[in-house]
Image (cartoon, rainbow, N blue to C red):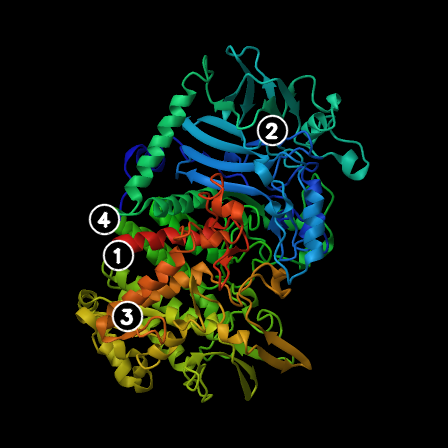
Amino acid sequence: MGEATGAERARLEEAARGGKKWRRFGTYLSERQWGTVREDYSASGDAWAYFPFEHARLRAYRWGEDGLLGLTDNRGLLCFAPALWNGRDPILKERLFGLSNPEGNHGEDVKEAYYYLDNTPSHAYARALYKYPQAEFPYELLRRESARRGRARPEFDLHDSGVFDHGRYFDVEITYAKADWSDLLVDLHISNRGPDPAELWVLPTFWLRNTWSWGEGEARHRFREADAAPAGARALALEHPHFGRLYVYFEAPDELLFTDNDTNYEALYGRPNLTPHVKDAFHRYVVGGERGAVNPERVGSKAAALKRLRLGPGAHAVVRARLSDRPLDDPFGDFTGVVRQRRAEADEFYASIMPPGLGEDEARVYRQALGGLLWTKQYYHFDVTRWLRGDPGQPPPPPERLEGRNASWGHVYNSEIIVMPDKWEYPWYAAWDTAFHAVSLALADPDLAKEQLSLLLREWFMHPNGQIPAYEWAFGDVNPPVHAWAALRVYELEKKKTGAADRAFLESVFHKLMLNFTWWVNRKDSAGKNVFEGGFLGLDNIGVFDRSAELPGGGRIEQADATSWMGMYCLNLLEMALELARYNRAYEDVASKFFEHFLHIAHAMHGGSGRGESLWDEHDGFYYDVLSFGRERLPVKIRSMVGLIPLFAAFVLEGEAAERAGGFFRRMRWFLTNRPELAAYAKGLEQPGQRERRLLSLVDRRRLPRLLGRLFDETEFLSPYGVRGLSRRHAGAPYVLWLGGREHRVDYEPGESQTGLFGGNSNWRGPVWFPVNYLLLASLRTFGRYFGDSLRLEVPSGSGRLMNLAQAADELGRRLVALFLRDRDGRRPALGDVALFQHDPHFRDHILFYEYFHGESGQGLGAAHQTGWTALVANLLDECRRGA
């Protein structure tokens, strides 16, 4: 694996040593702060209704800021983003528009065209693109058509409205480059793609997050116009206790505008404003022509330079600004040279980490996947105790909140840079998403990858009882326990990359993960029989009903996936312990504990807990959930990802490692001799495989070919673009269960969700999801390392093409990567049937990394910019070229 070299590597090393703070400023600004839980102070917990889009330009946010492809510092205090107006819109374009969960026919949905094009770990270079229509932005059409469509029809998106027809839009390309760690260049390149002249007002805007309105004694700080400015420029000055003295330079603006980042109480509530110049002043000045809206004294906590452009067909303009910690005599003299140099250094950085042999299109996918992932870093601030009780400078929240959402998570105090699943649709961390983000981040920035995993285990995140917070909508929900797997993968990737093993990181997370493992055992195995009930476990609507809620008619669900995740967790911690035992033999004792626990789980899962029944169905050759009503047990025979997750619990011990762990093997043999009923689940340890390797897995040699036969069956799970979340057999044979006097039903739904479970904004009933596909592929490689050519199967099933499991993993990886690459017809399957996206030269090479993908066509669905776990495509490209 390639190690980063050159100027970017030097910046990261300098920052790590405590030198220049290259990571202080970055693309950390959220794309959406309105409609989030942390801004919701309602009694009902309806975040979308409490803080709707219409309020975003009028109300000061409490916990963060948002803007249009902007940047901020690592405490979210000083922000930048451009604002735009095309002369027709009813509001100034200061942030991305989208539908709330109740408005969208498939849940929340951003209705804009924007792309993350490039980024580096230090954010010394970053580039993004926003496509702004020249016609009036169709806010109400998007709402109206989405409400009319219902769940049975696809989403109505911005390109469906016709606003991009004939190229009648502006490309606004935003480039950020750092001349030094506190010297930031903002380069806006604007192109008229249309056939007619068009007007555009551009307002590069700097502002301070409102920290002064909440009764915490914070002083208000303001920009003011500098007394003198270089020729051809206007300048601002700011004195701030966190930054010291800063200067902002704008190149040849038409005007400077000033206001304060304060709520417009008069517009919202009919009450007097606390300050005469409020948050929406620039909107009122530009769109409404209200000259008194801005501060004539030329000071304010929000400041912008107004530039009016009129561009002919195909014409181009540049708007530039610069933020520096020192006065500059010629702020734009070296500007172009710095931007070009940083672009060249970004090229050098990616060339050094990319696997050799990538084609041009593969390299494009790789770089945009990792660049997009770095763009999804966001400053996230949330003090749950303060949020529950309210601020001293504000009215107290309704008392219901003290017993409502997240009331038992008062220890959470987050003020961090965190990689989000999607900065508009999911602008908050999600526990199992973060694990996959880290695995991709390890390709570009191993230090950040380790930091992200460690954060969720810190005392200001993890509950004192050991639970890892899920996400702000309900910190107490349960996500799959994948952090141990991710920590191991990041550890291994960094070791390959640098040749150095960060044992301190591994040991630190190991101890915290043992607390979390104990929480699982104590809280999610209610019968104490090593069969677990995790709830929906991130798979949302995969089940016949909400698995997190109380069952109709009572009872509980014995979950094949929850039990398998715990089997995987045991093996991950076992592997960690054995790795740490190489340097401290005391960890061999801990390894023995997880080995024994794994065997108990395997035994219980296959009917050994005293009930006499198994989660494995011998007739079907598949694993199912089981409904348990006391003595009565009912298998839920849905062929879904739930039944494939047992494959994840597989671990291969290399031959030399087995020899090193002598104490562990002595205890293991004693245990198996004295617990013969469990020995059947450890045959792979006693019988060496290829190259003297040993295997522990939930799925044994007899069951494995049957289960993989279903996985690789194109009439069941295998699609042209990966493994579906639900077997295609349910297209003709829906699963129906009558319970509690009601019909509960699961149909095969290869695209967007037809059900309202979890808001209807995700679907596990047929589409392809990257995280579980990546884990399946990793498990195939694990089994392949043990079995070698001694186990071969048909891929696809019934095709007559025999492959060993390593080759089968390669085939699955090829199908997943094919989602993003141009096929022989020049189409990228993930971009669907939209001709604009597939063929227009200004769209076709800008790649979106969707949340999930249609189970037949591969079209991207869900959150369009979820570069989070879908960035795993970069790992697949890396593994394909270098070998896993």
Q: Is residue 111 visible?
A: no
Please tell me whether mark 3 sits on a helix, a strand or a loop. strand
User: Which of disc 1 and disc 3 is earlier in sequence?
Assistant: 3
Label 2 crowd bin: few (<14), some (14–19), many (20+), radius 10 Å: few
Q: Indicate left or right for 6 with 659 as reference.
A: right
- Type of amino acid at the residue the image marks with label 4: Gly
Which residue is pictured at 57% across the width and 11% down the height?
Answer: 227
Which label sits on residue 196?
2
Please tell me whether mark 1 sits on a helix, a strand or a loop. loop
- Type of amino acid at the residue the image marks with label 3: Met
CA gap, disc 1 and disc 4: 17 Å
User: Which of disc 3 and disc 2 is earlier in sequence?
Assistant: 2
Please tell me whether mark 4 sits on a helix, a strand or a loop. loop
- Type of amino acid at the residue the image marks with label 2: Asp
User: Which of disc 4 and disc 2 is earlier in sequence?
Assistant: 2
Which residue is pictured at 48% across the width and 71% down the height?
Answer: 522
Choose between 61 and 824: the one closer to the eye. Answer: 824
Front disc: 3 or 1 = 3
CA gap, disc 3 and disc 4: 33 Å
Q: Which residue is mark 4?
A: 499
Which label sits on residue 883?
1
In the image, is residue 430 above or below residue 607? above
User: Which of disc 4 and disc 1 is earlier in sequence?
Assistant: 4
Q: Indicate left or right for 13 with 170 as reference.
A: left
Q: Which residue is mark 3?
A: 803
Q: Is residue 842 visible?
A: yes
